[in-house]
Image (cartoon, grey):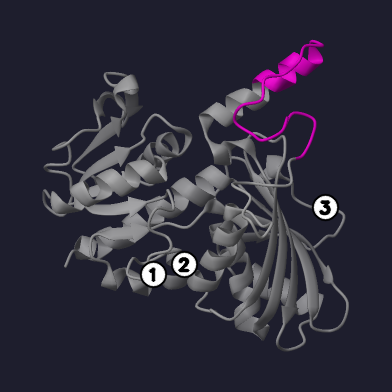
Amino acid sequence: MIENRPVVGVVGATGVVGREILALLEERAFPAATVRVFASSRSARERLEFGGREVVVETLADGCFVGVDLAFFAAGAAVATRHAPEAVAAGAVVVDTSGAFAGDPTVPLVVPEIDAASLARHAGVVASPTSGTVQLALTLLPLAEAAGLRRVFVSTYQSASGAGRRAMDELREQTVALLSFREPTIEAFPRRLAFDCVPAVGQVMPEGDTRDERRLVAETRRVLALPDLAVGATCVQVPVFVGDAMAVHVETERPLSPAAALEALAGASWLSVEPDPEDFPTAHDAAGREEILVGRVRRDGDASGLALWCVADNVRRGAAGNAVRIAERLHLQGLGRH
């Protein structure tokens, strides 16, 4: 580390999340001494732009993390499982977005606006939750603080970008094929996504829920420090390129009127709240923004029930944005490596 300016590495730099991490590091002026980018051998020697110059993609291989102080992992869980321990052994602190360590109780699972204090106990790896968890937990927090939470049910409407560049390309190709009266190719999703919805995101488990639904439930409980919170989730893939939407139904422990809920939500700096029920936000509105947009806040059943709609850029605010915010907190505490 040079004068409190870490050497930063980004694994999976050529992917959707990796590229957005680079963009945010530059936009938010993260004080990196230098930035190195890593990807598989297929992308080696590719050139990416950062800080007004070209950065050559390095092959992810044994020994590549020597000299790296902070390593973002924006590749799959298999890559993180194999290479993150190597990065830690080389002296880096790892911020992982893949979910490989999200279920490990010894690894902090962090949304900085909520549980940044848990960074103090990291041992080299910090897990960043799914973009859906970031969006849901940050929306629920003001309501939890205002009236407590008894039960939450959420239906997500997730964009193709959450499944990566290949999935976005497939949605584009399917759309063109159908508009050209051709049969579309189906590879990235279990069913055709163009002009349809797929009500199962991730592997379907024997009990009928999906792995993504389980992860959303477990991570939300953990991030909010509410291990007994009743949470139900249905995750749906929709034909949108960027931006996730959620229909959230909440039962609070104490009565909370829609007006009081709007006031509580509006007090959170990371939320942009629309009080007019006829002027609701959409995924298109959220694309490219770092705020979570909230609207359609209304009564749901009795005095303890509320319903709302929220949308966010799942890459910029979710996966990449949360990881960069974790890195900023880590930098403030000198990376906190024990």
Q: Viewer-proximal residue, 69 or 289?
A: 69
Q: Amino acid at mark 1?
A: Ala
Residue 233 seen in this snapshot: yes
The location of residue 191, given as percent across then percent down, is: 71, 33
Determine contact: label 2, label 1, CB under 8 Å.
yes
**Snapshot quadrant of residue 73:** top left
Residue 176 forms part of the magenta stretch: yes
Determine contact: label 3, label 2, CB under 8 Å.
no
Residue tagged 1: 116
Q: Viewer-proximal residue, 287 or 45?
A: 45
Q: Main secondary structure of the magenta part?
A: loop
Residue 133 forms part of the magenta stretch: no
The location of residue 77, given as percent across then percent down, is: 40, 46
Q: CA distance from mark 3 to mark 1?
A: 34 Å
Q: Dot 2: within a 10 Å radius of its alpha carbon, few (fewer than 14), some, or many (20 or more) residues?
A: some
Q: Amino acid at mark 3?
A: Asp
| Magenta-colored span | 173-197
Residue tagged 3: 279
